[in-house]
Amino acid sequence: MSAPPPPSKKGPGGHYSGANPVPNIQKFIQSLDSEKKERDSKIEAQSKANGTTSQSGSGAEAKDHINKATGVPKSRKSVTDPVTGRQVEIEDVDTDFMNAVDNPTVSAFVTTYSI
């Protein structure tokens, strides 16, 4: 007697039939959302236990950025560094270059080469 054929592989790459239908987008989304309700209920329970409720779910309220009025000269500006997020002061280079244009100086740079 011969051995029975191996069972068909179910899932991606298997043979599709009535017992193993071709997946569609709706079933895929439902499989992703199956655990979402449980996660959402746990997060809501934690936020109620902590006494915080927020619509965004992050627990932190967004605040407007307020520039501090520091005594910086007109040639300097206080800006937020996009990498570090800290307030840094930058200097307007136009004033330095304009001073160099208005008052040019000749610098003596002599180099002697010996061959």
Image (cartoon, rainbow, N blue to C red):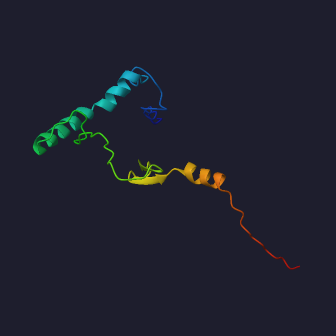
Q: Determine the residue located farthest toward the right in the rendered image.
A: 115
Question: Residue 75: horizontal and vertical position, in percent?
Answer: 48, 50
Residue shown at 64% from the left, 52% from the top: 102
Closer to the camera in the image, 100 or 109: 100
Left or right: 88 with respect to 30?
Answer: right
Closer to the camera in the image, 33 or 21: 33
Left or right: 114 with respect to 50?
Answer: right
Q: Determine the residue located farthest toward the top in the rendered image.
A: 18
Residue 19 position by quadrant = top left
Closer to the camera in the image, 115 or 42: 115
Q: Is residue 26 above or below residue 36?
A: above
Question: Residue 77: horizontal and vertical position, in percent?
Answer: 44, 49
Closer to the camera in the image, 5 or 23: 23
Residue shown at 74% from the left, 69% from the top: 108
Residue 114 position by quadrant = bottom right
Left or right: 85 with respect to 96?
Answer: left
* Labels in figure, total: 0
Q: Is residue 75 above or below residue 26?
A: below
The C terminus, quarter of image: bottom right
Question: Residue 54: horizontal and vertical position, in percent?
Answer: 20, 36
Q: Is residue 30 above or below residue 92?
A: above
Question: Residue 11: horizontal and vertical position, in percent?
Answer: 42, 32
Q: Is residue 84 above or below residue 7?
A: below
Q: Determine the residue located farthest toward the bottom in the rendered image.
A: 114
